[in-house]
Image: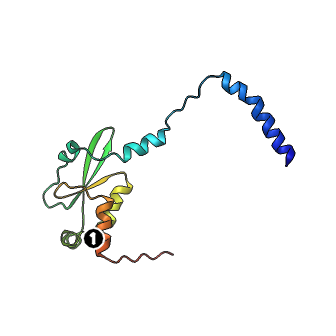
Amino acid sequence: MRHTLAIALFWLAASLPCALAAGPLQIEQSTRLAQVERATEPASAARQADIVVPPNALYVCVTSAGGVLMQTVIEFAPKVAELCASHPEMGPCQYERNACRRGGGRVFAANAKEITMATEAEYDKKVLRVQLKP
């Protein structure tokens, strides 16, 4: 143990002058951090104004590819659409919204208001969800 510590200290002492001679350290922002910062930026008012929800559609999935917004209507079976219109907190509705988010999209309701994870948390307070794991 003493030999390992002595070797580590020797290596540190030997490499310290080399590191100081190279000049100040240049710290670069990681690309992953930049991606996270961009992902957490709030939606601008201009982007939300660009959202157009077709008639009879409950939700639109909005994705961005190369700076171009692409909108896709989230479709439901007629009975499920009727259920989601009156009870958006129900499981089938949430499942489709989460499928959009997994694909990198954002979900907007018929009134062009974004359905965020905070909104989903409010929905979860209304219902009791049971998840079975194998």
Amino acid type at circle 1 is Glu
Nearer to us in this view, 112 or 99: 112
Residue sitting nearer the eye, 88 or 21: 21
Q: Is residue 119 left or right of residue 7?
A: left
The residue at 54%/32% (across/down) is: 27
**The quadrant where residue 120 appears:** bottom left
Name which residue lies at 42% across and 45% down: 36
User: Farthest residue in the right direction?
Assistant: 3
Residue 15 x %, y %: 74, 29
Residue 18 x/y as whole percent: 71, 25
Q: In this view, does 48 lie to the left or right of 19?
A: left
Depth check: 84 or 77 in front?
84
> Which colour style is shown?
rainbow
- Seen in the picture, residue 55 relative to 84 is either above or below; the reply is above
Q: Mark 1 points at which residue?
A: 89
Q: As drawn, is 117 to the left or to the right of 78?
A: right
Percent from the top left, x then y, of residue 72? 25, 53
